[in-house]
Amino acid sequence: MHLCCLDLEGVLLPEIWINVADRFKVKELRLTTRDIPDYDELMKYRLRILKKEGIRLKDIQKVIAGMKPLPGAAAFIKHLRQIHPVIILSDTFYEFATPLMKKIGNPTLFCHWLKVNKAGFITGYQLRARDSKRKAVLAFKKLGFGVIASGDSYNDISMLKTADRGILFRPPASIAKQFPQFPVCSQYAALIKHLRKS
């Protein structure tokens, strides 16, 4: 049996941080793992900006409450779950993503946790594990599962390399060029065809 491991933002949901950046008009928050490969570096940068701008967790959650999945994402997940068990491996946080998961049928989500002080400011984060996407795929394979994976950013590459098959979905041209060993899909119908193969 094969498991299907998917990234979340950029594959099923819009980028949360870009929506936050646009809502509060803070262009520095538009940077994502498509731009900065080092996740710790990116998150420390984001936390400095949030503190500087006085943006609390509840402010971000209000933005998230108004977000919708990417067009076709919910139907894609429903279809895919009829073919393979689906697990979302993401570098987002449960405090962000949980409400959005309901909008795509509540697939299983593995991500991280935020640290929040009494005033409601995000002060840090707790990673499930470093390089958690790759480690999750390794664990699934040790349990005897085949793994097919898809993502769009630098932080997905180790997951795609570790899986039995990896597919890039709507990546920036620079990432597609840098990792030509992975097929590239831009539509859910094409991605389903790739994910059907086992």
Image (spheres, grey):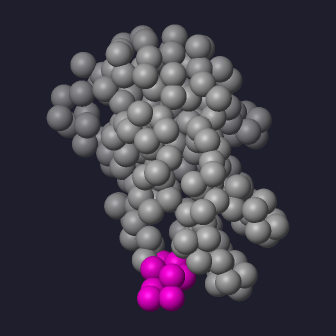
- 86 vs 155: above or below: above
- Does residue 181 appear anywhere in the picture? no
- 127 vs 69: above or below: below
Q: What is the span of residues highlighted in magenta in the rendered image?
A: 116-124
Q: Is residue 50 magenta?
A: no
- 61 vs 180: above or below: below
Residue depicted at 65% across the width and 20% down the height: 187
Q: Is residue 134 toward the left or the right of residue 166 in the image? A: left
Q: Position of residue 138 (x, y in %)?
A: 30, 41
- 22 vs 44: above or below: above
| Front residue of this view, candidates 187 and 119 | 119
| Front residue of this view, candidates 46 and 42 | 46
Q: Is residue 26 toward the left or the right of residue 170 in the image? A: right
Q: Is residue 174 toward the left or the right of residue 141 in the image? A: right
Q: Position of residue 78 (x, y in %)?
A: 43, 22
Q: Is residue 123 magenta?
A: yes
Q: Position of residue 16 (x, y in %)?
A: 62, 54
Q: Which quadrant is the N terminus positioned in?
A: top left
Residue depicted at 45% across the width and 31% down the height: 149
Residue depicted at 38% across the width and 38% down the height: 106
| Front residue of this view, candidates 97 and 3 | 97
